[in-house]
Amino acid sequence: MSIFDSAKQRYADLGVNVEKAFDKLASVPVSLQCWQGDDVGGFENTAGLTGGGILSTGNYPGKARTPDELRQDADAAFKLIPGKHRFSLHAIYLENGGKKVERNEVGPEHFKGWIDWAKANGLGLDFNPTYFSHPFAADGFTLSHQDKKIRKFWIQHGIQCRKIAEEFGKKLRTPSVVNFWMPDGFKDNPIDRLAPRKRMKDSLDEIFTEEISPRYELDAVESKLFGIGYEAYTVGSHEFFMGYAVQNNKLLCLDAGHFHPTEGIADKLSSASLFVKELLLHVSRPVRWDSDHVVIWNDDLRNIAEELVRNDLLKRVHIGLDFFDGTVNRIAAWTIGTRAMLKALLFALLEPLDVLKKYESDGDYTSRLALLEELKSLPFGPVWDRYCELNNVPVGTQWLNAVKKYEQTVLEKRG
């Protein structure tokens, strides 16, 4: 009997069908974030980030400098990750042919290369308006700005981004999730907390005026506790966007790094699912006050995956990654983070849910606790390895050899 067959039998003894868990996991796409590949620089200009509540650190060699290089790097990562997944773009990742394109004028034509690439690889594309790193965001406000002309500029940007995503959905035959995150806020304590939120609400209402079929495009709104330079107050707080999503039938985006460092988002999923039809997850790893470290398979991630599986939310939740680390190999970061997310989901799918739920409903909390502890030491590793084999991706640390070879043959030549 092989190691996998032995592990499979251990799970079968508890009533768990490993093959069914594989099938379920194969149906769950994870959206990889483009901004890990170039430290959130984008291709709008050569200056890269110029502020606005977001910052990437590190200078690991081989950063993608062009859309073609970024697509090449993403291809390298996808070959190491089991399953079929998605790719999430920011508006600043347009291909403008060397011509200046203002953000309120960006359109589907500037993303034709991305659409062609996604279609050739069987990928879905998601999208994000870029409400940072721009002169009109330099004072900390965009959709909530006091200046009506600046607000109008950003409103039109949002409208254009929805049109881009609609084109993604039509051409790729899978809905594109558009996530709205604005870092608007104050560094120190404001007097008037209401007025900016009223302006933000009115701006969003205008952006979402046009109805777009959910077959092609889905709108999500994302909160944040604080941002760099906006430590005291963010307009788009959790309460603001929770209320907006419920009132306007939008996806609520929960980012694992956008709450207090001691606060996890796992427990929010069941509550939010009662009031919104669908959710968007941005999976990141907060370390103290930095929210965007490479995802690892830790307790926070395990808790998120368990909540998704135990509450049958996988079809209602869109899973996206949101981290960027320029201190490590960027292809490795994508691979580590995505494989960690998939490991957590598979581990959750291997729980004997019917048994655990019966223990709980019967009030047998002793057996519930005992079984949960025993599950931790079951031979999960061979099951994960088998899933990788079935998907023709490297097993164990073999993927790291492929990354290092890619670094030597491709990344080091970029200078």
Image (cartoon, grey):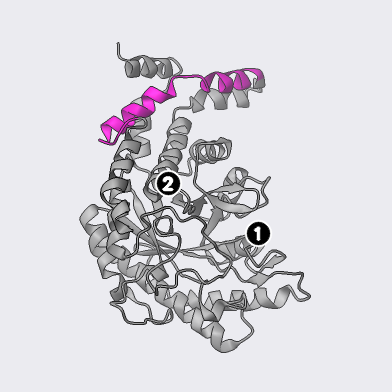
Q: Quadrant of the C terminus?
A: bottom left
Q: Position of residue 234 (x, y in %)?
A: 66, 67
Q: Is residue 264 left or right of residue 301?
A: right
Closer to the chain start, of discs 1 and 2, is 1
Q: Which residue is mark 2?
A: 333
Question: Looking at this view, is 249 or 57 the one in front?
Answer: 57
- In the rendered image, which quarter is residue 360 located in? top right
In the displayed structure, 284 sits above or below 99; it is above
Farthest residue to the left: give it: 120
The reply, left or right, for residue 379 in relation to residue 123 is: right
- Circle 2 packing at 10 Å, graded few (<14), some (14-19), many (20+), is many
Report the magenta stretch's main SS: helix
Most extreme residue toward the right is 191
Q: Which residue is at a point 50% across and 51% down the rendered structure image? A: 281
Q: Which residue is mark 1?
A: 225
Q: Quadrant of residue 349?
A: top left
Q: Residue at x 35, y 37 (%)?
A: 400
Q: Position of residue 213 (x, y in %)?
A: 37, 67
Q: Which residues are magenta?
A: 366-395
Mark 1 neighbour density, 10 Å: few (under 14) some (14–19) many (20 or more):
some
What amino acid type should be assigned to the residue bearing mark 2? Ala
- x, y (%) of residue 81? 33, 41
Q: Secondary structure at mark 2?
A: helix
- Judge whether residue 370 is colored magenta: yes
Secondary structure found at label 1: loop
Q: Is residue 167 above or below residue 261?
A: below
Name the foreground residue: 3 vs 168: 3
**Residue 80 in sight here:** no
Front residue of 373 and 137:
137
